[in-house]
Amino acid sequence: MSAPIRLLIFSDRVEIISPGHLPNNLTIENIKMGNSNIRNPILASFASKLLPYRGLGSGILRAYKAYPDIELIDDRQNNLFKAVIKRKILQVS
């Protein structure tokens, strides 16, 4: 799908919206158990050779480990996948 990834920043949350719902039989429950599905195998093969990073397919698990207050939404009706990261609101006194 040819559409940009959107990053929306609000006072109480950050939303990352990716065009296209989860591929194949991948579900949010599968993702939380460590399963992944490469959407663009050509890009992934180049990235694994060019970038020093070696955690391909582990980004969401690492995000949950660092900050568990993340909601994942597979919106098949609107053909998008959304991650909502709730922000802690600081009280200024």
Image (tube, grey):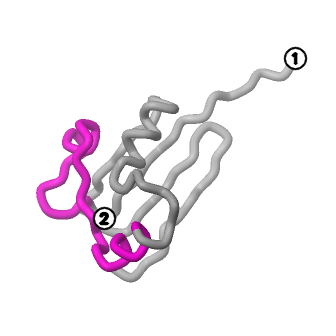
Q: Is residue 34 magenta?
A: yes
- Residue 76: image location, x then y, percent: 23, 60
Residue in the picture at 48% in, 72% down: 50
Position of 42 compared to 53: left or right? left
Amino acid type, residue under disc 2 in the picture? Asn
Give me the disc on residue 78.
2
The residue at which mark 1 appears reads as 93
Give me the disc on residue 51.
none
Q: Quadrant of residue 30?
A: top left
Image quadrant where one finds the C terminus: top right
Looking at the picture, tell me which residue is in the foreground, 49 or 22.
49
Secondary structure beneath disc 2? loop
Residue in the picture at 62% in, 37% down: 12
Position of 75 compared to 83: left or right? left
Q: Residues within 10 Å of mark 2 (few under 14, many from 20)?
A: few
Looking at marks 1 and 2 on the same chain, the residue that comes earlier in the sequence is marked by 2
Q: Is residue 35 magenta?
A: yes
Residue in the picture at 40% in, 67% down: 48
Amino acid type, residue under disc 1 in the picture? Ser
Whole-Å distance between the Cαs marked 1 and 2? 42 Å
Residue in the picture at 67% in, 41% down: 11
Q: Which residues are magenta?
A: 22-48
- Residue 85: image location, x then y, percent: 51, 40
